[in-house]
Image (spheres, grey):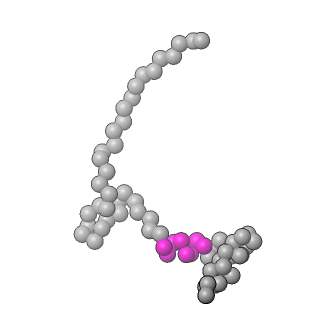
Amino acid sequence: MIDLIPIRFIILPFLARDPKAMEIVQVLLESALLRREKNTLDVDGKRIVELPPKEVCYQVLFSLPL
């Protein structure tokens, strides 16, 4: 048997554009998804992402009139 709870309490109100449905979806997504930033540390205290130093290159461009 198909579980109808997600359909009844999430999908149908969401399709009906019920504002409460969006809150429910946000709560579900926040609990399922993790936000990782470049300064986030793992359990050993190391950054989870090692990024190379930022490199900025400037180039002079010339344009000719048409």
Residue 41 position by quadrant: bottom left
**Is there any visible trace of residue 59 in the rendered image?**
yes
Residue 12, compared with residue 61, is above or below; it is below
Task: Please say if 41 is above or below 59.
Answer: below
Q: Quadrant of the N terminus?
A: bottom right
Magenta span covers which residues?
A: 25-32
Is residue 19 among the parts visible in the rendering?
no
Residue 45 as seen in the image, left or right of residue 6 = left
Tell whether position 59 is magenta.
no
Decide which of 47, 8 is in the foreground and name it.
8
Q: Nearer the viewer, residue 14 or 60?
A: 14
Q: Is residue 14 above or below residue 9?
A: above
The count of marks equals 0
Q: Of helix, strand and loop, which mostly describes the magenta segment? A: helix
* Relative horizontal placement of residue 5, taking residue 16 as reference (left or right): left
Q: Position of residue 56 (x, y in %)?
A: 36, 36
Q: Image quadrant for the C terminus?
A: top right
Q: Position of residue 27 (x, y in %)?
A: 56, 75
* Residue at figure coordinates x 32%, y 57% from the top left: 49
- Outermost residue, bottom side: 1
Q: Residue furthest right?
A: 16
Residue at the farthest left position: 44
- Residue appearing at x 71%, y 76% in the figure: 12
Residue 60 position in % (x across, y down): 42, 22
Q: Residue at x 35, y 59 (%)?
A: 39
Horizontally, residue 40 falls left or right of residue 3, namely left
Residue at 58%, 71% (x, y): give it: 26
Residue 26 in magenta stretch: yes
